[in-house]
Image (cartoon, rainbow, N blue to C red):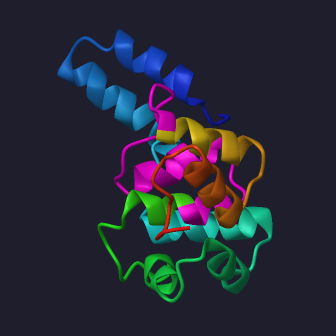
Amino acid sequence: MTAKNTAEMENEILQVKTESELQNFFDENKKNLPDLTLAEYLEILLKEKNLSKVDVIKKSCIGNYAYKIFSGERKNNSRTKILSLALAMQLSLNETQRLLYYAESPKLYAKDTWDDVIIFALNNSYDVERTNQLLTDSALKPLLGDF
């Protein structure tokens, strides 16, 4: 059985009408409902993209705090720090939305100007510094500190 995409999963769950059907949905889709921590998902991304944790942390501009995120020691991370990691890893929009999900942060929303800049930066492989500059030039709050 191949993995289902989000649209397929949404279509299926919308068809569920009873609690027993809901349980069947869970049973049939265990593979498609991974129960990962943020740290586990970050490790998967590092391996899939053949990235070095040290390089990602350096590019993220969040310093040693990032090690605590990667280790799972740090919970309730700010959305901006998670987005800085996404930019440093050059994640796609879908990968970033999933990263935000595991971080228990709101996904990027296309009707929000600040989020639009982040989406643009992700789509164009901007790094954190260039993204911060774009945010500042757009009179928006930068990801990290004042640029």
In magenta stretch: residue 39: no
**Residue at the left extreme of this rendering:** 19
User: x%, y% of residue 136?
Assistant: 56, 54
User: Where the N terminus falls, by quadrant?
Assistant: top right
In the depicted structure, whether residue 111 falls above or below residue 60: above
Relative horizontal placement of residue 26, taking residue 147 as reference (left or right): left
Q: Would you say residue 139 is visible in this rendering? A: yes
Look at the image and give the residue range highlighted in magenta. Answer: 84-113
| Residue at horizontal 38 percent and vertical 27 percent from the top | 25
In the depicted structure, whether residue 53 falls above or below residue 86: below
| Residue at horizontal 45 percent and vertical 43 percent from the top | 33
Nearest to the observer: residue 2 or residue 106 = 106
For residue 49, which quarter of the picture? bottom right
In magenta stretch: residue 90: yes
Nearest to the observer: residue 138 or residue 17 = 138
Relative horizontal placement of residue 28, taking residue 96 as reference (left or right): left
User: x%, y% of residue 48?
Assistant: 74, 62
| Residue at horizontal 37 percent and vertical 10 percent from the top | 15
For residue 59, which quarter of the picture? bottom right
Nearest to the observer: residue 89 or residue 119 = 119
For residue 57, which quarter of the picture? bottom right
In the depicted structure, whether residue 3 falls above or below residue 10: below
